[in-house]
Structure formats: C-alpha cells, structure tokens
Image (cartoon, coloured by chain):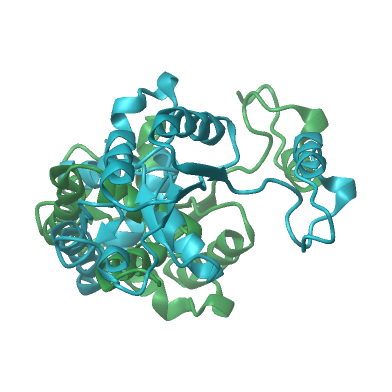
Chain colours: A green, B cyan
Amino acid sequence: MSYSSAVQELIDQLGRLPGIGPKSAQRVAFHLLKVPAEDANRLARAISEAKERVSFCPRCFNLSEQGGECAVCRDPKRESTTVCVVEDAQDVVAVERTGEFGGRYHVLQGAFSPIDGVGVDQLRIKELLARVTDEDIEEVIVATNPNLEGEATAMLIHRYLKPAGVRVTRIASGLPVGGDLEYADELTLGRAFEGRRSLEEA
Amino acid sequence: MSYSSAVQELIDQLGRLPGIGPKSAQRVAFHLLKVPAEDANRLARAISEAKERVSFCPRCFNLSEQGGECAVCRDPKRESTTVCVVEDAQDVVAVERTGEFGGRYHVLQGAFSPIDGVGVDQLRIKELLARVTDEDIEEVIVATNPNLEGEATAMLIHRYLKPAGVRVTRIASGLPVGGDLEYADELTLGRAFEGRRSLEEA
C-alpha cells in the first residue's frame, strides 16, 4: 500500500518547495490532514490570494500589491537619484529594515550563475540600464550578496553601466557587527582589512 | 517597510507548518510568488482537495479517501485477528512497506504525552478497547515509536487491554539492520541484549 492519490499529490506538491525534502513534505502533509479543515484551507487561500494580488513592479521589479508600481516607486519622498540594486525582493525588506537608505530599488530577480541557467538575460540588467539612461540616477549601489554569484553580478553591472557614466558603488564586506575576529573566516577578515577606513573619516 | 498584507499572510500561514521556521516560511513564500501562477495554485488545490477527499476511517482511524472505512479495513483478505497499533497514519505506510504484516491497524493519532496535552482521551484507546471487545481480535501488536512517549503509550495500552484477555505484544527494539555495534547508543544496545533470542528459534 502506498498513499492514496490525493495524499500523494499533496506530498508531491509540498516536496517541490525549496528546502522541503521528501520527509518534511510527508510530515507537513500529514499535519495538514490532521488540522481542522479551515486551518488548512486558510493556507490554500493565502497561496491563491498572494498569487492573485501580488505582482512585480514594472519599474523596479519589487513586489507590488496594488498592480502597477510598488510602494517605494510610488513614494514621492524617496530620492530618485540613488538606486540600490538587490538580488531579490526579500533583500528590499532587509535594506528597508536598516533605515539607512532613502533611495529607490532595482530588483534583479536572481544572481548571475550560468551553471544554474541564470545569465544576463535572466536578470533585470537591461531594465536597469534603461532606467539609468531615462531617469536622473547619479549613483547605483550594488547590494547583491557577498558570495560568488553576488560578486559576479556586481562586476557585470559595473561593466554594463560604465558607458552610461553613472557612479557604481558596492556595499562594504567585513566583519559583522558583534562578530569575533577569532572566528572570522580568512576571506571576510581579508575583506575587512582591504576595506579599512581612516578613523578620522568616521 | 514590511511586507504587504497578502505576502505577510502567506508567510504567517506557511510559518505555522511543522518544521518551517520564520526564515523558511519567507523563502517558501517568495518562491511561490516567483513561480508561475499555475504551479502555486496546484499546491493550493492539492491542499483543499486532500482536505475534502481524505477522511479518517471510522474503525481504525487510518486515512481513507473514499469516505467510510479505509482500504485496509475494507480488504477481506486481511487477517482480522491481529491488529497493529501505531501512532500515526504515516506509520501504517511504513509497516505496509515491510510486507511483513497481513492484519489490520489501529491508529492512535498521537502518543501519550501529558506535557503536550495528549492524554488518554486524546488517543484512540477507548476505540481500540471497543474493537477488542466487539471484533475477534487475538493479538494486539503495539508498534508505537521506541521513544519515551511511545513506550509510555505501549504500557498504557497494555494496562487498558489486560482485562479484555487479549495478547498484547511490543515490536522488538535493538540494533538497526546494517547498524554498527560500535556506534550504537547504550540504551539501544541494552535493549538488544535484553531482547536476545536463541538462534535455534530463528
């Protein structure tokens, strides 16, 4: 005996989610079968509704719940001269949480990784170039992740935007605040030395 | 800026699933927002359909997709004199996979754990007692998990069924097949010694 078709279909669909292996999918499926129907259906509804109501901003590709441009692009108080380039919409929320950035965003929807089939055409780099040409952007802050793909993406953006004469900067790499020198990996520590700043500047 | 309401609702609902923390919930939510609408809706549909079509067998509390009794209870070829007691419906599938058991099941829908609010009344022990009284059951094999809760549940079942005069057995604990004596924990190894069998019996 294996699972009945409805149960198997549920396990299969759950197993396609990122970070959920076959065992977790099974556990989640049985959890859903056990809870009251309204709880399970609330999840089903949340999925359908999010898919229906949430779209991507046509300008910066951040999430937008109203259709059309996202909350940041529609906000007239945000500086239009600075654009922060991030990999994913989650990263917009992370940057917003710092409260340090008052400009606009550009979401690439991924990072350069040819081995995973993500090349220049899969990223929103052309759209970024168009924005740099059309809008009065002075600085592009590349805030992709400080890993292999993120760094490659940053180099790529730098190369594409150079002819447009815009200033392209990269967020600093170094020791995390509250971190411990002793436990830092050598790459991070190397970057921290490389990016050292005069204390007078601060 | 935090997430818009539809996204936040999706993250919240995903975060209520077992084994999915806030970070995973966020990752899964953004994955669902990124994939084509039909893929996400297939998951939503699988949840609603499973909830609609799958119910619990009124006799053994295994999953049943046809309404009414489950596939095992409806199968006239299964021995009705032996009942295997398991904690969850997943365990039925695990036992079926061994191909060693031809009797029927009884799913307790949990294990005795007063600290988690699971007492005798939350388990299907009364229903098991009624089956032992009404059906021609000769042996009850307790196949709850070999952990604290599972052992407590086994003792509890033994105590409840004793007056009914039915034979109650417990599946063996010991070294897993392919396991290594050197790496076995002392409890398991102790159990393996305790449950040793004469080679002549085999």
Asked if A130 appears above or below B30 in the picture, the reply is below
Residue B65 location, x and y as percent? Answer: 21, 65
Q: Nearer the viewer, residue B144 or A105?
A: B144
- The image shows a total of numbered marks equal to 0
Q: Nearer the viewer, residue B27 or A7?
A: A7
Residue B103 location, x and y as percent? Answer: 42, 62
Residue B58 location, x and y as percent? Answer: 20, 51
Residue occupying the point 58% across, 64% down: A149
Q: Is residue A1 left or right of residue A148?
A: left
Asked if A1 appears above or below B54 in the picture, the reply is below
Q: Residue furthest top?
A: B115
Q: Nearer the viewer, residue B11 or B62?
A: B62
Q: Is residue B32 left or right of residue A1?
A: left
Q: Can residue A75 be spotted in the picture?
A: no
Residue occupying the point 14% across, 53% down: A45
Residue occupying the point 46% across, 58% down: A20
Asked if B143 appears above or below B179 in the picture, the reply is above
Q: Is residue B85 left or right of residue A146?
A: left
Residue A163 location, x and y as percent? Answer: 47, 72
Q: Can residue A96 be spotted in the picture?
A: yes
Task: Classify the position of the N terminus of chain A by image quarter.
Answer: bottom left
Q: Quadrant of residue A98?
A: top left
Q: Nearer the viewer, residue B38 or B107?
A: B107
Residue occupying the point 12% across, 56% down: A53
Task: Classify the position of the C terminus of chain A by image quarter.
Answer: top right
